[in-house]
Amino acid sequence: MASSFHKAVDVCSGLLLLLCFLAVKSCAAQKYKSVNLGGWLVVEGWIKPSLFDTVPNKDLMDGAQIQLKSVKLGTYLVAEDGGGSKIAVNRNSASGWETFRIWRVKDGSYQLRVFNKQFVGAINGGGGIVNAVAATPSTWETFQIIRNPSNPNRVHIKVLNGMYMQAASQDQLTADLQGEPGWDDNAATFEMTIVKGMQGEYQLTNGLGSNKAQILNEHWNTFIKESDFSFLSQNGISAVRIPVGWWIASDPNPPAPFVGGSLKALDNAFSWAKNHNIKIIVTLHAAPGSQNGDEHSGSRDGYIEWDSQENIDKSLSVIDFLASRYANDRALLGIELLNEPRAPDIAIDKLITYYRNGYDNVRKHSSTAYVVMCNRIGPADPKELFQMNNGLTSTVVDVHYYNLFDDQKFKGMTVQQNIDYVNNDRASTLNSLVSANGPLIYVGEWTSEWEVQGASKSEYQRFGEAQLQVYGNASFGWAYWTYKNVQNHWSFQWMVQNQYLQL
């Protein structure tokens, strides 16, 4: 009888172990079909350009890169040695040292940052030489850029004491012209070329000012609504990835120029997610100092300065805030510690230290939420985060796959070559990551847009189908970039509604 009893216990124990194994296997095998809610809580102008319609002089927002050519001398302004020295006017062509990045103080009033990150300054507020030595800007580094009403690319630059900058010689730019210079070919008139601009949240809020920037609250209330969560759920989407900016942790009173309200919108998303059985990954897209220089990182001027200890500590505080706020919300799937840090600007050792500390911050509040770590973009080993994940639980490595942004690779590819690249190169890379006995793998961003011009609907369908098949093999799943976009093929909503993307 005792023997029978022990056999029964053994059978029960075996069944229990089997059930536990199956439960774990089922959990580990769960994959998420996701969509990014890009352009919502972190502004990206290319997703919704109309947000910038009312910004005055919107071609001279923060981060705009300009070059200035003396109309009298026919040569360009240059920060000698890239900065730390004088401003001369002796270059026949323009490149990095001849390019100045705008910091906008208010409409018409600006500061100019040079290649080595110093600021252009007029000594004693004007009356003498102009150099680029200040590490931080103040009143002497603040100027008015006055545009010719009939030719906005012709400008005068007025300094603090009311004098104007002039190129009297190629050797040295000075700020000593008194009186109104007029718009003829004089030493104070410069031809301004805008090389590129930026349209991110910093540019919008600083360009509009704190009062007008409240239009963002209307954007947050209308761009994504509960009906969108219903649409996603009805189309088989089980999770959303929501980009946020570091300033959300200070809501409702974030530091200038950002405005409050995005945290309330994120809270709404968690409520809608529960109503429609959708999970949420919150991703720190815009980190203090910018981790990649792109407008979606909240960058002011395109420089990458996240890796200072002050900015890293701020980022960790944001992760702690998000984890503490949403850890007990059943809609929370995971927290992504940083989106798209750029290699080689962000060193791998600093990133790994940050990821370990961020992991600990999440684990203080939740033992089950996934901790997502994004691979560096640029020249980086796709497995560079694997070793650090040893011994950690519920971790995910996020990889982003676009058949874009690399002219040498994708420019000129045919439809079939793009599809073959996904089926062969992407599949091979992804399979090597999934089979490496490391963390779960998540294709956190991909899209059906490509470099092919004039592709037909059926060709888009074939390209989308190839990506769905290949990225469906990722052990954690995939997320389309993005849900809404004025450019149709980037919009998951439009692609599904018009049957370009067939899940």
Image: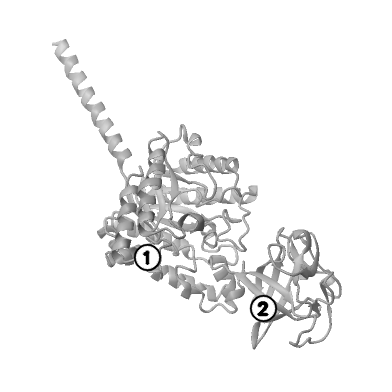
Q: Quick one: quadrant of the N terminus?
A: top left
Crowd around label 1: few <14 · some 14–19 · many ≥20 (10 Å): many
243 or 66, which lies in front?
66
Regarding residue 430, the answer to whether it shows in the image is: yes
Type of the residue with mark 2: Gly
Q: Which amino acid does the dot numbered 1 rest on?
A: His
Residue toward you, 214 or 480 = 480
Image quarter of residue 139 = bottom right
**Coloring scheme used:** one colour
Against 58, is 394 above or below?
Answer: above
Corner quadrant of residue 11 = top left
Viewer-nearest of discs 1 and 2: 1
Q: In the structure shown, which secondary structural element does the residue marked by tag 2 occupy?
A: loop
Q: How many tags in the picture?
A: 2
In this view, 291 is above or below 62: above
Residue 311 on image: x %, y %: 61, 51
Q: Can residue 369 be seen?
A: no
Residue in view at x 41 percent, y 61 percent: 450
Instruction: Residue 241: give x, y in percent of width and height.
Output: 40, 55
Residue pictured at 56% horizontal, 62% vertical:
254
Q: Is residue 313 left or right of residue 235?
A: right
- Disc with the residue nearer the chain's start (1 vs 2): 2
Q: Residue furthest top?
A: 2
Report the residue marked by disc 2.
Answer: 108
| Crowding at mark 2 (Cα within 10 Å: few <14, some 14-19, many 20+) | some
| Residue sitting at the far right | 128
Q: Which mark is residue 489?
A: 1
- In the rendered image, residue 430, in percent from the top left (x then y), is placed at 39, 43
